[in-house]
Image (tube, grey):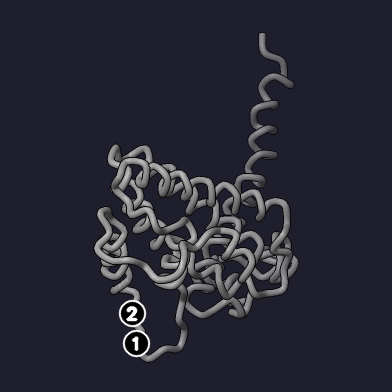
Amino acid sequence: METAADTTAPAAQRRTSRPRADALRNRERIVAAARELFVELGADVPLDDVARRAGVGNATLYRNFPDRAALTHEVVLAVTSRTTRRADEAVAAESDPFAALSRFVHAAADERIGALCPMLSGVFDKNHPDLLAARQRLEEAVGGLVQRAMSAGRLRTDIGVGDVLVVLSQLTRPLPGIVCQDIDRFTHRHLQLFLDGLEAPARSELPGSAATMEDLRRRG
C-alpha cells in the first residue's frame, strides 16, 4: 500500500528538477544567441542584445555569466566542442578518408569557427584547462582526418593540420560592416576549391612549409 510519502515523492522530484532543466535551457539559449551575434556583429556586441536575442532577461544572463569574459569562454568552448563532434560524425558517415575530410571541412564552416578569432584576442583566460582540453580534442580529431586521408594516398603530403584550420578560419571569419554583406554565400564554393587543391596527386609545389598546430599556437 502506498503511503503519502510514496505518492508525493515523484511530484516533489519533478518540482525540484524542473527549474534545473529550465535553467539549462536558458543557458543554452544564451550561448547560442551570443554565438550568433558575435558572428553577425563582432565580439563586442552589447550583452543586453544577447539577452534579448536569447529571449531571457538581463538578470538571467548575468546570473549565468557574470561578465563578458565568462560568456566568451563558454561560446569558445561550445564552438570548439561542436566542431570536434563534426569531425567524429564525418568519420562515422564516410568510408573514404578524403570524403570524410571534405565533409568535416564543410560542416566546420557551418559552425563558423572563424568567429573564434576576434574573440581569442579578448580579455579572458585562453589557457583555462577546459579550453585547452577542448582544443586538444579538436586538434586530435582533425589530425586523425588528415592522417587517414594522407595514409590512403588521397591527400597531398605537403600540408598539415594547421593548413586546414587556417583556411577554415579565413573563410568563416565574420566581417561585420563590409560592403559585400552577402559574402557568406561563397564560403562553401571557395572551400570546395581549396579541397580540390588538397587531393593527391598534387598539381603544384606549395611554397614554404606545412602549417603545424605549434605554428598556430606560436602566432596566436
- In the rendering, at what x and y percent does residue 58 appear? 67, 70
Query: Residue at image x 73%, y 57%?
Result: 128
Query: Within the image, what quadrant is residue 192 found in?
Result: bottom left
Find the distance from the CA under tag 2 to the CA under tag 1. Answer: 6 Å
Q: Check the image and name the residue furthest to the top.
A: 1
Horizontal side, residue 3 vs residue 209: left or right = right
Q: Which residue is mark 2?
A: 183
Q: Secondary structure at mark 1?
A: loop
Q: Which residue is mark 1?
A: 180
The N terminus sits in image quarter: top right
Q: What amino acid is labelled 2 in the image?
A: Ile
Q: Secondary structure at mark 2?
A: helix
Asked whether disc 2 touches disc 1, contact meaning CB atoms under 8 Å apart, the reply is yes
Q: What amino acid is labelled 1 in the image?
A: Cys
Query: Residue at image x 36%, y 84%?
Result: 181
65 in relation to 121, above or below = above
Which residue is at the front of the view, 83 or 153?
Answer: 153
